[in-house]
Amino acid sequence: MVSISRDWWEHLAPKVMHNRRSEVEALLRQWCRSDYGAHWLRVAKEERGVIRVKPGQSAPVVHFVALADTPVFIAPQERVKEGLRTVGLELFRSGHTLDEGELALRPEIRLDVVQDQALLAAAARLDTSPHIPGVKEPSQVFSTPACFLFAPTAWPKKSYVLYQHIFGEGPSHPYDGFFYIGVTTRSWQKRWAEHRRAVDAGSPLLFHRKFREELR
């Protein structure tokens, strides 16, 4: 049975995605009926569960896409790229180690919401160019280890949240763009609102300066 915690979904996901939880949950239930999906779900429910992969193999990410108000759909699984940025141990409780070039990735849920008219028009004409002219509102991509949504062990309002903002466009997004990492006892949305106000106010901090440069 697949069930996404409403409390954690609304605590972690951007507000524009809150009303998409039921759609994501229903699609995920169907997806997990496959052999790979069932394996993914078993690992995803473990607090520290990982799936071992090598470049060229499928990434353990269920990628949902919402184009404006149209129904959510699941995008094809992406392949693991050479040089993918990861952080983690190479020795497991089982005593096994990673083979050369192998990565240990946590099962993830990702939702990509596209609302900008230029991006929607490009999607309609199947334009996959890395740079789409006329974009005013970049797409929002939310990604989280699935275990945080399936088997939470803490109450959102009393937990620390380690968050990462990745920003960029074209081939740098969403994996290889500039990024900022922070931790907060509040929701990351509140911290992001504070960061964005500082960006707009001309803050000289490196994160804020680089973000302004990427908006140009």
Image (spheres, helix red, strand yellow):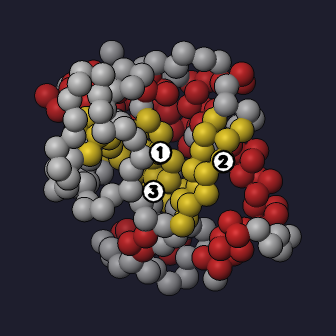
Few, some or many residues within 10 Å of mark 1 (<14, 14–19, 20+):
some
Q: Which x, y percent locates residue 147? A: 43, 26
Q: Position of residue 76 (x, y in %)?
A: 24, 51
Q: Is 205 placed left or right of 216 in the picture?
A: right
Residue type, label 3: Leu
Q: Give the number of callouts.
A: 3
Per the image, label 2 sits on a secondary structure element best described as strand
Residue where numbered disc 2 is placed: 182
Question: Disc 1 residue type?
Answer: Ser
Q: In which quarter of the view is residue 14 placed?
A: top right
Question: Residue 12 or 17: which is nearer the viewer?
Answer: 12
Of badges 2 and 1, the one in the foreground is 2
Identify the image quadrant of the N terminus. Answer: top left
55 is higher (above) or lower (below) than 47:
below
Q: Determine which residue is flagged by label 3.
A: 67
Q: Which label's residue is closer to the chain start, 3 or 2?
A: 3
In the foreground, 63 or 17 = 63
To which residue does mark 1 refer? 143
Of the pair 69 and 202, the residue shown nearer to us:
202
For badge 2, the amino acid type reads Gly
Rounded to the nearest whole Å, what is the CA distance between mark 3 and mark 2? 29 Å
Residue placed at 56% from the left, 31% from the top?
9
Q: State which mark lies toward you, 3 or 2.
A: 2
Residue displayed at 35% across by 47% down:
63
Alpha carbon separation for disc pair 2 and 1: 15 Å
Contact between marks 3 and 1 (CB within 8 A): the answer is no
Q: Secondary structure at mark 3?
A: strand
Residue 135 appears left or right of 23: right
Q: Residues within 10 Å of mark 2 (few under 14, many from 20)?
A: few
